[in-house]
Amino acid sequence: MTTKLLSIENVTFHYFQRHGLRVKKRTVLNNLQLDVYQGEVLGVIGRNGCGKSTLLKLLAGIYQPDKGRIVANNVRVSLQTLNAGFDNALSGRDNALISAMLLGHCKAHALSQLEEINDMAELRDQFDEPVKTYSAGMRARLGFSIAIKMQTDVLLIDEVLGVGDAAFRSKAEQIIDEKIRSGLTVILVSHAVHQIRRLCTRAILIENGKIIDQGGVDGVLSNYEKTIKNTIG
Ligand SMILES: Nc1ncnc2c1ncn2[C@@H]1O[C@H](COP(=O)(O)OP(=O)(O)OP(=O)(O)O)[C@@H](O)[C@H]1O
């Protein structure tokens, strides 16, 4: 039987946005319902601003729902975004150590993994330089390598794969393939249709804060492409 790892139960989430002197409540996700199963690679697609990154932040526990709840029993969730919570003044090495410990690993284990994290991220001497000196691609490589080396149950990837150079992208996709084969659960936000098609086993399409389609990747992608064509006219 397939194990359910995460459940999003009727989740609604608002941001408060300032318009001049007024503050407006904006509902970004509206009564969302979704189950995530062990070993699946779930693609999350939708137009800019539809709420994909917000959904991942809710799943990672960075935000709390305004209504509804997220059930994640004993599941270690790791979020990889381009703005991963690195401390810019600290080196890649120190950030890797802190991130690993925040993921629940003891210091000795985290320390023992640092060289492998650097090998995967290919930062070499720059591993000991402050993260503020890193390019976007280097930050993405560091975040991805931490998440992969420090075991998590669910890996949330927000556009990170689009940033590294072609060599790193291909290496990252190969690593994800291996992880998927070994049973890691992945939720992938990407605008790269070919990436969703190649990596994902299921997809959801978000529009106006709701899941308007879900299921097989080809069907959901073709619906997505139709919604884009309709908008372009
Ligand atoms: N911190 C914030 N405060 C206020 N509004 C926000 C905040 N973060 C995001 N939003 C708004 O919420 C909506 C959803 O943003 P989100 O980043 O989740 O979208 P997305 O689908 O990931 O977009 P993209 O494809 O462009 O990355 C957008 O309209 C955005 O302007």
Image (tube, rainbow, N blue to C red):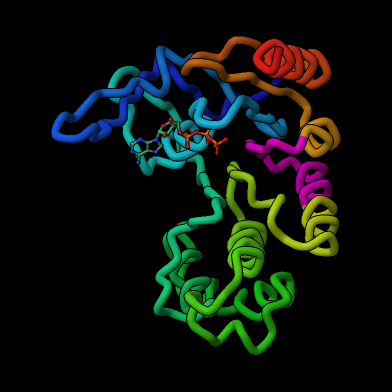
Q: Nearer the viewer, residue 151 or 233?
A: 233
Residue drawn at x 36%, y 19% as measured from the top left: 12
- Regarding residue 215, the answer to whether it shows in the image is no
Q: Quadrant of the C terminus?
A: top right
Residue 116, percent from left and from top? 69, 75
- Using the image, determine if residue 63 lies above or below residue 118: above
Residue drawn at x 82%, y 42% as measured from the top left: 181
Numbered range of the magenta stretch:
176-192
**Residue 185 painted magenta:** yes
Image quadrant in which you'd find residue 217: top right
Using residue 112 as the reference point, say whether residue 57 is left or right of it: left
Using residue 171 as the reference point, say whether residue 42 is left or right of it: left
Total labels: the figure holds 0
Image quadrant in which you'd find residue 143: bottom right
Residue drawn at x 69%, y 30% as measured from the top left: 43
**Residue 180 painted magenta:** yes
- Using the image, determine if residue 9 lies above or below residue 38: above
Using residue 16 as the reference point, say whether residue 105 is left or right of it: right
Q: Nearer the viewer, residue 226 or 182?
A: 226
Q: Nearer the viewer, residue 177 or 232?
A: 232
Residue 89, percent from left and from top? 40, 78
Q: Quadrant of the N terminus?
A: top right
Q: Which quarter is ligand 1 in?
A: top left
- Regarding residue 157, the answer to whether it shows in the image is yes
Image quadrant in which you'd find residue 34: top right
Residue drawn at x 60%, y 57% as measured from the top left: 147
